[in-house]
Image (tube, rainbow, N blue to C red):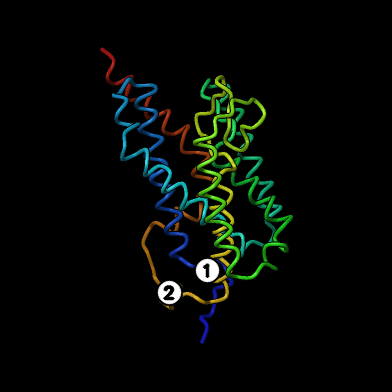
Amino acid sequence: MENEIPQTKKQRIELIDALRGLAVILMVLHHFLFDLVEFLGAPEWLFSNPVFNVLHYVFAGVFIGLSGVSSNFSRSNLKRGLQTLAAALLISGVTYLMKTPIVFGVLHLLAFCMLFYGVTHKFWEKLPKAVMPVFCVLGAVISAYCVANIKVESSHLWLFGWTAPDFVSYDYFPLFPWIFIFLFGTWLGAFIKAGKFPDWFYKTKVPVLPAVGRHALIIYLAHQPVLYGVTMLIKLCLAP
């Protein structure tokens, strides 16, 4: 017997929100470490080290995948995508003025993926269930390999992962391989929506984290100005 899937805002699947909330918190922590290095002169290894360099992409992948999952529950992915695009463009404008430009960060990627899926979802939904995960895994692996190993210095292919030497984006998530992570999430989300997961998945209650996950976009927009202010306050306090 399939599980009943929550339909109202009060009955959201808390575990999904909790995972998103955890990814957001770790992102905020990572950005705070960047601010300490960039604006306070903290040691470079505090932000860039083998452990954080890997975890950064792991939790970003979780965040992007969960966005794909949520596409199954959205009333309009086109509207959702346009809202996210507006937020992404706002971030581009602010970071340009701060001389730490973000050309195509995670919000730009998610906006593109939401709009793309909003237009093409009927095609993906018609594919046999076993085809989609294979396509996504192969697409992610092959595209990541190509971007890493095929050297193309181009000022026109940055959307896909190939950049010119003068390309600068302080947050950069190109379509390859990340769009395949998003699409994998849409495939997974269909099973979640259909009640195919274990009963505990839908009933697990988690403190605090779901509330963070439900306000992920607001936190993403607000956290960097707050962190910058905190960093400047610390700098002021440490000044001789």
Farthest-out residue, bottom:
1
Outermost residue toward the top? 240
Determine whether 126 is above or below 91 in the image: below
- Asked where in the image residue 194 lies, by quadrant, the reply is bottom right
Is residue 22 shown left or right of residue 121? left
Frontmost residue, 230 versus 75: 75
Type of amino acid at the residue the image marks with label 1: Lys
Amino acid bearing label 2: Lys
Residue 87: image quadrant is top right
- Where residue 75 appears, as percent x and y from the top left, is 68, 62
Vertical comparison of 37 with 179: above or below: above
The local secondary structure at tag 1 comes to helix
Looking at the image, residue 83 sits to the left or right of residue 147; the answer is right
Position of the C terminus by quadrant: top left
Q: Nearer the viewer, mark 2 or mark 1?
A: 2
Q: Is residue 66 above or below residue 130?
A: above
Q: Give the mark nearer the N terminus: 2 vs 1.
A: 1
Residue drawn 32% across and 25% down? 44
Q: Give residue 65's position: percent from left, percent from top.
A: 51, 55
Is there a contact, CB below 8 Å, between mark 2 and mark 1? no
Q: Residues within 10 Å of mark 1 (few under 14, many from 20)?
A: few
Q: Which label number is shown at residue 10?
A: 1
Q: Badge 2, how many Cα within 10 Å: few under 14, some, many 20+?
A: some
Residue at screen point 55% across, 58% down: 184
Q: Nearer the viewer, residue 208 or 67?
A: 67
Looking at the rendered structure, which numbered label has been put on residue 107? none
Q: So how many labels did they put on this image?
A: 2
- Secondary element at image label 2: helix
**Label drawn at residue 203:** 2
* x 43%, y 77%: residue: 198
User: Could you say where residue 228 lies in the image, as x and y percent from the top left?
Assistant: 43, 28
